[in-house]
Amino acid sequence: MIKVKITGKAGAALERELPTDIHQLHYDMREAGISKPPKNILLHDDKDVEVKLSSDSEIGSRLLRVFGKNDTLADANTVAFAVSTAREEVLTDLEQNIVHNQYLTKEMLFDDIREMTQAAGPVKLTFYCPLVGQFDDGNYGNEYICVNGSFMVAYQDQIEQAIADEQAPEMGDMAQYMDRNAGVAAKLMSAVWTVEEMDDRLLGRIDCHLKEPLTAEEMSDLREEILGQCSDGLGEGFEQRPIETDEGDLYVSYWNSSDDYFLCTENELDEHMEPHQGMGGM
C-alpha cells in the first residue's frame, strides 16, 4: 500500500512495504545500522534518518496527505495497517473518502474507520464486569493497597484514557481477536473496552456492535471470549501497566478470581449490583 525507503546518516538504507511488523522493521533497521526506533523517526525533517514514502496505488498516494510534521514512521505503518485491515463492510466508503481527500490527519482517519465500523453493526450489546485495583502510593515497598470500583470513581478519566490507549489503532478492533465461533465472527463488527460509573461504583464496560442479534449459542461463546480477553488477553496486559495519579500508581483489572466476579449484560446487571450497595472505598 505504502512504500518506504529509510536511509541513515551513514548511508545505510532499506526499503519496505507498509504495513509491516513494526518490531521486525525495527530489527531490520538496527541490522542496517539505523538504531533509532520507528516511533521516534519523523517522516519529515528528521535530523538522523531520511524517510521517503511513495505508493503505486491511488489509495496509497492519497493516504500520504494525512501525515503532518510531527508524524513518525510508526504512525505511517499504523495508518497503512488501519486501512488494509478495515472490514469489508466499510471498505468501499473508506476508499472513496480517501480518494476524495476527506481526511486531513491520521486521527480523522482513525475516528472515521471506528465510527463506520460501529455503524455497520446496528445491534448494540453491552457487557459489564467489576473492576478491582491495586494502588501503590510509594509508602509500602512492594505491598499494594487493594481498592475497588467505588474508590476508582475518582480516577475514571485516567482509567478511561488508559484502556483507550490499550486499544490503539495499531492493535485493530478487538472484534478481530474473537473468532472462535464463525457465527460470532461474521456478526461482530466492533468490541470496545471502557468504563462506566454506576451507583457510585466504577464498572468495566464492553460495548459490542453486531450486524444482527446472536443466537443463544453465539451469545454464550461471545461471553466466553470476552471473559478470556478480560482475564488473559487485553485485560492481562492492561492490568500490568501503571496508571499515574496524583496519589500514586493505580493498576486496574477487568477480572478477578473472587466469588463476586461477574460478566453480565445490561439486562442482568441489577442482580449483580444490589449486593454491593454501600461498599467502601478501599
Image (cartoon, helix red, strand yellow):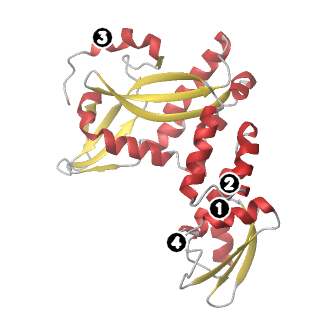
Give the residue type at disc 3.
Glu
The alpha-carbon separation of the residues under discs 1 and 2 comes to 6 Å
The answer to whether the residue labelled 4 contacts the one labelled 3, judged by CB atoms less than 8 Å apart, is no
The alpha-carbon separation of the residues under discs 4 and 3 comes to 49 Å
Asked whether residue 172 appears in the rendered view, the answer is no
User: In the picture provided, is 235 more to the left or to the right than 197?
Assistant: right
Question: Which comes before the other along the chain, label 1 or label 4?
Answer: 4
Which type of secondary structure does the marked residue at label 4 adopt? helix
Quadrant in the rendering for residue 103: bottom right
The residue under label 3 is 274
Q: The C terminus lies in which quarter of the figure?
A: top left
Q: x%, y% of residue 254?
A: 42, 32
Question: Which comes before the other along the chain, label 4 or label 2?
Answer: 4
The residue under label 4 is 40
Q: x%, y% of residue 268?
A: 45, 11
Instruction: Pick whichever, 41 or 276, lies toward us.
Output: 41
Residue drawn at 20 percent across, 48 percent down: 247
